Amino acid sequence: MTWTWKLEDADGNALETPDSDLGSQGDAESWLGERWRDFADQGASVATLLEDGRTVYRMDLAPSEES
């Protein structure tokens, strides 16, 4: 199985995503966890996790508001 991420801007346009062919869901989640702020700074607003091209889940990359 191959796990990859697809990044999109706020309008749903696909953004260039660095190679992220990873061997497990945990590896993929850790990979994004280390980089999501950089991607958000570059205009990404949504990340979609794919397993062999099938959508597993989508998540918002906006940082949470601090109280």
Image (cartoon, rainbow, N blue to C red):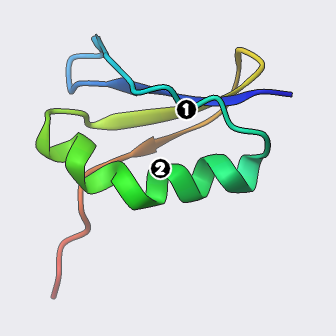
What is the x, y in percent for residue 55?
A: 67, 24
What is the x, y in percent for residue 8?
A: 32, 23
Q: Residue furthest right?
A: 1
Q: Residue furthest bottom?
A: 67
Using the image, determine if residue 62 lies above or below residue 3: below
What is the x, y in percent for residue 34?
A: 41, 60
Front residue of this view, candidates 43 and 23: 23
Residue 32 - label:
2
Residue 51 - label:
none
Q: CA distance from mark 2 to mark 1?
A: 9 Å
Residue 1, picture quadrant: top right
Within-10-Å neighbours for mark 1: few <14, some 14–19, many 20+: some
Using the image, determine if residue 36 lies above or below residue 54: below
Q: Are marks 2 and 1 in contact (CB under 8 Å)?
A: yes
Q: Residue at x 24, y 33 (%)?
A: 44
Q: Nearer the viewer, mark 2 or mark 1?
A: 1
Indicate the amino acid at tag 2.
Answer: Leu
What is the x, y in percent for residue 63?
A: 24, 62
In-image side of 55 versus 7 (left or right): right
**Residue that mark 1 sits on:** 20
Q: Residue at x 34, y 51 (%)?
A: 36
Q: Quadrant of the C terminus?
A: bottom left
Within-10-Å neighbours for mark 2: few <14, some 14–19, many 20+: some
Front residue of this view, candidates 42 and 23: 23
Using the image, determine if residue 62 lies above or below residue 65: above
**Numbered disc total:** 2
Q: Residue at x 18, y 72 (%)?
A: 65
SS at circle 2: helix
SS at circle 1: loop
